[in-house]
Amino acid sequence: MLKHLRKYPFAGMLATLIAGILLSYYEVLPLFRALVAGGVLFALLLLTGTVFVRGREVLWWGAVWVFLFCFGMWNSACAVQRSEWDEPPGEPQIYCVQVTTEPVEKANSWQVHVRLADRKEAILYVMKDSLLQLPAVGDMYLVRTSISRPMAADEYSFDYGKYLQQQGIAGTGVVSRAGMLFLRHERVRGFVPFMRSVRSQVEHLFDGFALRERSVLEALLLGDRRHLSADTREAFAASGAMHVLAVSGLHVGIIASILMWIVTLGKWRKPKYTTDNHHYWRAAVLCSFLVFYGFLTGLSPSVTRSVLMFILLAVGSLIRPKRSRYNDVASSAFLILMFSPLTLFHSGFLLSYSAVLAIIRFYPSLRLYTKSKFLNGVWSTVAVSLCAQLGTLPWTIYYFHRVSNYFVLTNLGVLPLVEYVLIPTFFVFLALSALPVAGAFIGGLLERETWVLNEYVSWVQQLPGSSAEVYLNGWLTALLVAIIVCFMLRGKGRRWAAGVLSMVFVCSLVYDYACAGREQDLQVYRRSNSLAVMAREGTACVVLSNDSAYALSATHDYRLARHVQTCSVLPLDSTQRYTVFRWQGEPYVIYRNKYGKVYRPTLLEQGGLGNY
């Protein structure tokens, strides 16, 4: 046991910290009692380890684990409390806010992140107006709005309110130009405003590019997806290349690999350079460039964790090549969760670390050694894609309900193009953009390369059966994660454990299908003036709506989760004051008042509307 504790010290520390965060977030244990019991146990272990020499190291490790467990519970509870919004939705109130980020343009509004007087974060949607002066970072306003946390349409739909809570945001509100009063501007000092200006100058370099290519370059290189069209998003999602448009582990890993090759003078992966006394300087240069790129992309949570993880991995391999990579990955996750415990529930956090762990564990077994460098390179791309897809499969299905069937084909074209062509060309373009002729030539080349990337992704998307929609609930996702973890572990019993869990997974999936076939339900969805009423019996449903497009999109997740195979959308006449339909043999009525407000369906009593 001591051998594993010394080799992977951060693994046990991370496990106990995660256990504390989970038990506190889901309120499995009462916080106060758990902290008191943990404090007593921590003191006993510490005192026992001080008195008895034999087993002292194990006892002190136990004390550290107990402390981290209690710290995880307390820190998670504090983070949830900071993101709670206690005021019930009602009449608009006056709030003093400070703008913290640049406005993001939406269809009918501008999305602005603000900080309230009590240090809580919120999102305001400022309605578009020709006379509106866009807020700037640091501006102070008095706004009149009603802040609330959005509620999920049903138990299977995306819970935007919980997502905001996990991001540390208390709620959202809508405000018009008339409801905003400018107070003053407080200048934000430090390195972040300087990097924002640098980022703005980099974005201006893409002026003159085609709109589609510019939006993809901004998303791919700077993490700015504001200008991506719906068609472009759908193409990258269906082909399995959406990870390219999210600046995260892929981009930071590629840049770290290029920098490693540069600072080691092309001797990366060769042990000769480790005997050089200059490896500390090389590590410092590598860290500086990675941190600079993190600030350039806005220090989003995905970039922050990726930069930290690759700093530990790359610097560790420079200074001590034979150290455990598992320990480096665990240490980066540990540091992130110590400061931001709710990051554990972010999809990007789970996807990044699952992919990295799967690649570290499975890729050495899949490597191909032949005399052909081209064949080795092609198989290396395929192997990395397979490992990453296996590690991220449960979370991809759970969060996005979609699996790309041609992810290997997509990555065979996308990854080499991004790693060996686009990103190096981008840095050359940055260096030569001030030169008129050379800058224009490299800029045109970069635009053409991005066009090739877009066309390749669109071609993969148009292939028959490019993606499949799959739904797994929390229990089935946990089983699938456990099965993959069993394959990652080493030992004789891991295959038996994986086999048993696989049987339980299949039986649970069959049971879920059987239950869905016997269920009957009635759901109501409302957004502004759009209404959809879904009546379901088993795997068939009927939807009454005054907006068929909204009806299909609002009920999509529910129908996917409950395995609905046939769905009929019937029109709901907006001119009629009453609409009557039958469900389970009983008549129901939808009532609309003279102002157009629609009420949820209620059981119609005999004679209530006369001869209906």
Image: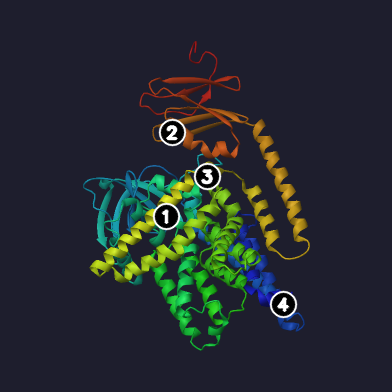
Q: What residue type is disc 2 on?
A: Ala
Q: Earlier in the sequence, mark 2 or mark 3?
A: 3
Residue 265's place in the image compared with 165, above or below, is: below
Q: Earlier in the sequence, mark 4 or mark 3?
A: 4
| Nearer to the camera, 406 or 533 | 406
Residue drawn at (48%, 37%), measured in percent from left and top?
Answer: 554
* Horizontal arrangement in the rendering, residue 474 relative to residue 507 (left or right): left
Residue 296's place in the image compared with 536, above or below, is: below
Q: Earlier in the sequence, mark 4 or mark 2?
A: 4
Which residue matches tag 2? Answer: 549
Q: How far apart, in angstroms, are the residues tagged by discs 1 and 4? A: 48 Å
Q: Secondary structure at mark 3?
A: loop
Location of the N terminus by quadrant is bottom right
Q: What residue type is disc 3 on?
A: Ser
| Nearer to the camera, 149 or 522 | 522
Q: How far apart, in angstroms, are the residues tagged by discs 3 and 1? A: 17 Å
Q: Secondary structure at mark 2?
A: helix
The answer to whether residue 77 is seen in the rendering is no
Q: What residue type is disc 4 on?
A: Lys
User: Label 1 neighbourhood size at 10 Å, few (<14), some (14-19), many (20+)?
Assistant: many
